[in-house]
Amino acid sequence: MSHYASPEVLNEIQKFLENRIGVAICKNVESKVMLSDIPKLSNECQVYGSLMLTSGYATPCIAIEFDRDVFALALETAKIISDFVYDLGVKKSLYIVWTGRWLEIRIHELAFPSEFFKEISNPVIAASLISEYILSSLRDKLMKISFVSSGRIKVINAVSREKLIAPLSIVDSMNVAIYVTRDLLDDLTLDSSSISNPMHSKKWNDVVSGEARELANLVIEAFRKGKVKAHSFSEIVARGGTLPKIVGRFEVMALLQAVRYYLLTGDMEKAKSFGLNRAIFYAWLKYHGSRRWRVPQVIEKEKQMRNHSTGSESTSLGIVKDGVEVGPRGWFTIGGQEQTPTDFDKQVRFKFETFIPFEVVWRMAVNYVKQFPESVLRDPNKFFKYVYEPVRDNFIEKVILASHHQYPKASEAQRLGVQSKKAETIVRMKQKSLTSFLRGKVSEDSSHH
């Protein structure tokens, strides 16, 4: 039986083609098609609908083209676009299309007030202006993502294509076009569009009329001021270039330690303080040479170090086995200095953001760290060895550019917390005081820890 004869497939295509001109492409031959013709189509055909509806609306659409080996980063690109639209009030009327080859972010045309399409004489131009406004607003972030991917991710104003692939239409012998809502983005995989078991959501058509009014007003304002132009179809892609050498081990340690604390507590602000605190501590230890210590010895040495430097006591938090000191304002301190979220943003976040949006870095670091069990996250030795150490020198390649299943992982025994004395880490101290060390340029010395 033909794929298109399935009642479920027919129902979804019928919803999409309402007020649209249907198009079938069979063996590279394109022709108009009626709904009654679709069950007769062979599995070599693809079904599209016109971007413009006969009711005078048109569908804004942004496409993300990419190589499959940067799929995880392409998903982050989709999240940045969908988050931007969501923050403008479009919460239920946005949906994502995954075809096994490319991604699309669309906004349901009925989410816009009818007067918007009437004010712009041509509905297709109106839809194009919406896509242009979104792309121009996010150009810097999207260009950075394309740059990090070495140009393997390209973001396009897809209104120029004038037709949209229908839900559950066959794409090739392996894939169909699935429509999903924004909340399912994290669940998408390379296999989600499999023709045998597609992860399709029927909620894609749950539009809220007028939900995109704020976005429409912003587009009109930008159009009147000449910030977006009709007949402009942007393509955002970076060509060539080398990643800057501004993120080293210090920044990677601070980031992963912050994620570690966040996953254990859910407290983002204190996580930033903790991450920077731990990065400074490990940088200081590295500065003073290398020797292995067991966890109790590390905590005791950290207590001695702080007592010598500040005359104060440090404690081992219940959530982690590190010896840490908390100041009167609730931030973590070391050497008499507190590490605030603002300090983290200046010393860590800022460096990442010079070449990639930090929200991308954070989400992908969370995806990487959360694969490890709680026993590893609580123990500083295990965390250093199994989470930080495998990616400290190639964080971008192994975490940002890798798909989730490609992340470096410890063996099953290690992931269950079985650890030999050889694997225990952390280092001894010499005579230089922590206070004097903190007065220096931590980040310069820390690139070697």
Image (cartoon, helix red, strand yellow):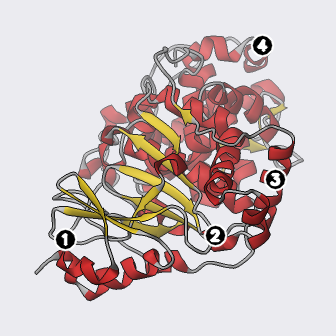
Quick one: label 2 or label 4, which is nearer the N terminus? 2
The residue where tag 1 is placed is: 196
- Measured Cα–Cα span from mark 2 to mark 3: 17 Å
Q: Residues within 10 Å of mark 2 (few under 14, many from 20)?
A: some
Identified by mark 1, the residue type is Ser
Quick one: label 4 or label 3, which is nearer the N terminus? 3
- Mark carried by residue 9: none
Q: Secondary structure at mark 4?
A: helix
Quick one: label 2 or label 3, which is nearer the N terminus? 2
- Measured Cα–Cα span from mark 4 to mark 3: 57 Å
Q: Position of residue 392 (x, y in %)?
A: 46, 27
The residue where tag 2 is placed is: 56
Mark 3 or mark 1: which is in front? Answer: 3
- Measured Cα–Cα span from mark 3 to mark 1: 43 Å
Q: Secondary structure at mark 1?
A: loop
Residue at x 41%, y 31% (from the top left corner) = 391
Q: Is mark 2 in CB contact (under 8 Å) with mark 4?
A: no
Mark 4 or mark 3: which is in front? Answer: 3
Question: Which is more toward the observer, 387 or 224?
Answer: 224
